Amino acid sequence: MPEAVVKSAYARDNSGIAPKPLPGTNVPPEKRFFHLHHRLVLKEMSGRSLNQMTSRFLESQERRFANSEIGEDWTNIPDLYSWLENVVFQASVESLAGTKIFDVIPNLMNEYRDFYNAAPTILRGLPRVFSPKAYKARDTLVASLRKWHEEAQKNNPLRGFDTEGQGWDEWWGTQFVKQRKALVLAMDGMTLDGMASDDLALILTANVNAVPSAAWLIIDVMRNPSLFERVMPEVTGAFEADAEGRKSLNIVKLCNSPLLQSIYAETLRLRTSNMLPRVINTGEQPLKRWTFPKKGAVFVLGNVAAFDENVWNSGTGSEPHPLHEFWADRFLKYPDDPRSGPLRNPAPEAKKAGLDEITEDDGPRFTTSGLDGAWIPYGGGINMCPGRHFAKQELIGTFAMLVSQFDMEILTPPEVKIEPNTGFRIFGTMPPKGKIEARIRRRRAPMDR
């Protein structure tokens, strides 16, 4: 982001994201960018807008899978993560920002990958002279996104905030992206380079967790044949026929599966290592033994509590499930097993505090009850990630679309543990370390869906 834009646009808004401005601030309501942006994201990442975006995401994946050259004979994939990265990234960007962005930037996936790999180096704050390759990756992507903005504006000019009801289009994508751009362009001192930098932030935010999390979910299920057999009826049961007999994925139904929700939650618990920033805006001190200056920044590593033996259920002596290992059932509460569920010592009142709780007949119940402050892959409070509902549908939907069309085998031996790349520790969900070889083929007999 150009320094001049930061100073003239973003730094002038110190009023916070809440509807009520922070005490002592005097930013005009129309200039409260962070609040206006937060309100916009909350609106567009829920309800009808969320449903439309998820539908577009799944349609993109289904189309790409159907047009894939993968046939009914086994095809080796030397690097499964890179393959899945392409699958999720392209569908995510298309659902958000349209299809024309790939025409304007044919190499967008590779440019994003280069920037993503360079981001940890850039975050260390090293001068450009010591990390020219990393900064070049960022500059290249910013320049490409500026070109996309210019071409899109030329072919389909933005009309300020007058986008209500326009829906998705191939140049700008969602109504959310259009209104977000109108909001950013209205900021004092905004430039095309500033806009492109903001676009980069959006694309990074949309993919930095979704891509590796989807990959881990697929890897964990595919490496466990018995778990795969448990999951498949959930997937096939979520493909429902319309009046003409055409089947499509009911993503809401699938995302309410207790087992898949537990797998999803465990994936995030085990591999997400996000840095949660907070700014001290009042005289209150959040930590009793520490004193922070007003306007001081506090950073908390989000996954420390995810491995707290005093909080989490790690199984029993005869059936251990260590916190450093994946356990698909960790978030499932079985009615006939008082030792089940995510908590080591569940309290009777813990049920009331859950973020989510799904019951299916007399079977297991997915729950995060009692995990406030322990399971925080999306942060917490007013700062909790507003895109978490879309991310959940991306992860579970990607798995369903993949296994409905393809057979896949991961060739890494079962006794070899696939580790996360800790070089991305503060970035969110850490991707797998090294290459994972796999093979894939189109299903010879279509899944009964």
Image (spheres, rainbow, N blue to C red):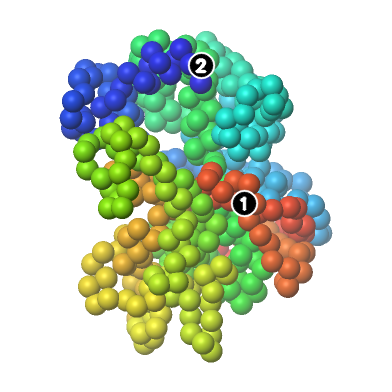
Identify the residue at horizontal 61%, vertical 18% (top origin). Answer: 143
Residue 360 image point, x, y percent: 36, 73
Residue hosting label 1: 422
Q: Secondary structure at mark 2?
A: loop
Total labels: the figure holds 2
Residue 161: quadrant of the picture: top left
Residue 99 image point, x, y percent: 57, 29
Mark 2 neighbour density, 10 Å: few (under 14) some (14–19) many (20 or more): few
Q: Is residue 363 visible?
A: no
Residue type marked 1? Thr
Q: Is residue 336 above or below residue 44?
A: below
The quarter of the picture where the C terminus appears is bottom right
Residue hosting label 2: 2
Q: Secondary structure at mark 1?
A: helix
| Residues under numbered marks 2 and 1 in contact, where contact means CB atoms less than 8 Å apart | no
Identify the residue at horizontal 58%, vertical 25% (top origin). Answer: 100
Residue 48: quadrant of the picture: top left
Q: Is residue 326 above or below residue 135?
A: below
Q: Which mark is residue 90?
A: none
Identify the residue at horizontal 48%, vertical 16% (top origin). Answer: 3
Residue 33: quadrant of the picture: top left
Residue 77 image point, x, y percent: 78, 53
Identify the residue at horizontal 30%, vertical 64% (top origin). Answer: 354
In terms of depth relative to the viewer, which is nearer, 40 or 404?
A: 40
Residue type marked 2? Pro
Mark 1 neighbour density, 10 Å: few (under 14) some (14–19) many (20 or more): some
Q: Is residue 128 visible?
A: yes
